[in-house]
Image: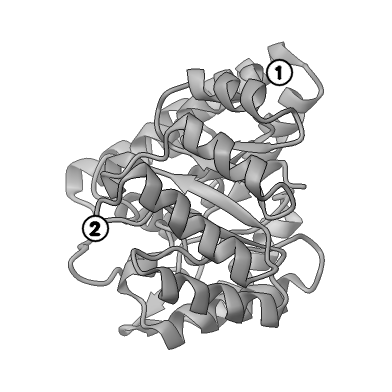
Amino acid sequence: MFSGSIPALVTPFRDGAFDEKAFRRLVDWQIENGSSALVPCGTTGEASTLSNAEHHRVIEVCVEQAAGRVPVIAGCGSNDTMNALLHMNFSKKCGAQAALCVAPYYNRPSQAGIIAHFSYLAEHNELPIVLYNVPGRTVTDILPETVCELAKRYPEKIIGIKDASGDLSRVTDHRMGIGKHFCQLSGDDELALPANAAGAVGCISVTANVAPRLCAEFQAACAANDLEKARELNDRLYPLHYAMFSDASPAPVKYALSRVFEGITDELRLPLVPASAEARAKVDAALEHAGLL
């Protein structure tokens, strides 16, 4: 259902409020430069600092501005099952094509609790779900056997995964345990090349915020099995992938956008603060390496 370069969009702020005008321009720029789908209100979109009303408005604006040109995978995750369902209900109503749902964080549910959480969401909403596994942030890890169990229980609902576990063997675990139809998307830009080689079909990307054309061309080269071109593009992007996490994310990517995309500032919401001078220097060097400055 989904493939290619899919930016996990930042949420632009200006004077403390959602900058809708800048966000609409960002959506257009992403689509014009080859992004194959869009993810609002993920980790990079600072969803954890948005009120529910803001969260829903960001999704709504993304869907409106995309206007059917590319699908929208709305960030709907929460550590509260009912709040996740609230986000899914809104996203379904406003026209999103799928929900990205992170593993419940902080509460640290067991694997049985994870299955119960996603089963409830699948049974109470028609929106397809892309699981999001990022144990470095959530502490909770959606183990491969749990992913396979959920996909087998709800083949029409649990349709894919954004895997940011850092464990490349899981791509094969999921493919062999579920099948090639299960949509596997890397959640780590720097691991997208080996993940694609193992059977992933794209990346929900931080770097694509800043380098949408290069990321789209990289994913197209992977899909065409043009390994030489894919390596060349990966080498150009590789320092940028790491620079995006040279300080607490999304501070570096917002700084990078302020350098390459007019109208977006590096404003964040507390407890996040702007990138350090050291991180900014790393971002600048990586942008120059990629040919973006």
- Residue 230, x across and y down, in percent: 67, 20
Is residue 222 depicted above or below 271 in this figure? Answer: above
Read off the residue under disc 2.
107
Q: Which mark is residue 229?
A: 1
Residue ID at (64%, 58%): 38
Q: Secondary structure at mark 1?
A: helix
Residue 177 visible somewhere in the drawing? yes
Badge 2 element: loop
Residue at 63% across / 73% down in the picture? 62
Spot occupied by residue 147 in the image (x, y as percentages of width and height): 53, 38
Specify the color scheme.
Answer: one colour
Q: Tell me the kind of residue under disc 2.
A: Asn
What separation in Å lies between label 1 and label 2 (alpha carbons)? Answer: 44 Å
Most distant residue in the top direction: 228
**Residues packed near mark 1 inside 10 Å, few (<14), some (14 to 19) or many (20 plus):** some
Which of marks 2 and 1 precedes in the sequence?
2
